[in-house]
Amino acid sequence: MNLTQRHKVFHRTMQVDGLDIFYREAGNPEDPAILLMHGYPNSSFLFRELMPVLAAENYYAIAPDFPGMGYSSYPTRAEFQYTFESYSNIISSFAEKKQLKKFALYLHDYGSVIGMRVALKNPEKITALIFQDSNAYEEGLGKEWDACKAYWNNPTKENREKIGEFLNEEGCRQQYLAGVPEEQIPLFSPDTWILDWTLMDRPGHTDSLYALFEDYPSHRALYPKFHEFFRSAQLPTLVIWGKYDAFYSVAEATCYKRDNPDAEVHVFEAGHKVLESHFEEIAPIILDFLKRKIVLKDR
């Protein structure tokens, strides 16, 4: 791979367990790998600015779209089990097919819900963890989740109605703008949530994604295993958070230091999608962390 190609982002599709998984990749596959895991309702488009920056610094960045999101397959519920375990199996198979023998994980939102299961399945492969507004501690599920918790505990029609509708275009928009200070809103391009919703808006698909949401209690049940993994592995860990995140409370940001005291925590005056509003501030922090924690090959 020549220097010009190193800075380019390539867009490809690979079949994994019967599904077409779209992914973006940049850099030389022989360099230290970083598997970037987007959240709901996003896609690998979330990492469009970060990937060429990582590649330029001699990292191999690879970001798949999850099934039912982005440009990957949109299977029906009859064809695919919409659970986080199923998603983690797909991504683990994807990493194996891409021959990722060792890789760091960048985890955001649902990306952490899926990615931490990937880490538990492949602990010997994980070189570092980067959490961006994600979830591995109960503290992250603030009062905004009270209606969800009530429904998970007692899944009645009445409790479901109390959650309200969020699998719609406005719900996609709020993933970016909820809680964001007014003066920052012009930093967000409508392209992001319009793309998310345009790809999601398919007959019956919101029911599939609601089934995935209903599986969230299985993620909470794994919190103790995640914490034990943090304590035993003591991996290089970077935590990036938006102070005004309306979905995962900023109270979680420092929780990672309980189980890994060396975890590095950075909180920004931002919302849930900090890469959209604070990329210029965050990218140098990520690169500095990787430079100190991930040994590059001699070139």
Image (cartoon, rainbow, N blue to C red):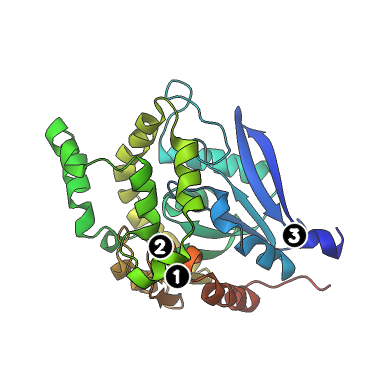
> Residue at label 2?
133
Residue 152 sits above or below residue 203 on the image: below
Given residues 31 and 42, the one toward you in this image is 42
Q: Residue type at mark 1?
A: Ile
Q: Which mark is residue 255?
A: none
List x then y, in percent, for residue 132.
45, 64
- Callout 1 touching callout 2 (CB < 8 Å): yes
- Whether residue 77 is visible, yes or no, is yes
Mark 3 and mark 2: span between their CA atoms?
26 Å
Given residues 203 and 28, the one toward you in this image is 203
Q: Residue type at mark 3?
A: Gly
Residue 236 sits above or below residue 198 on the image: below
Q: Residue type at mark 2?
A: Asp
Q: Label 1: how many residues lie within 10 Å, few (<14), some (14-19) or many (20+)?
A: many
Element under disc 1: strand
List x then y, in percent, for residue 296.
73, 71
Mark 3 and mark 1: span between their CA atoms?
23 Å
Earlier sequence position, callout 3 versus callout 2? 3
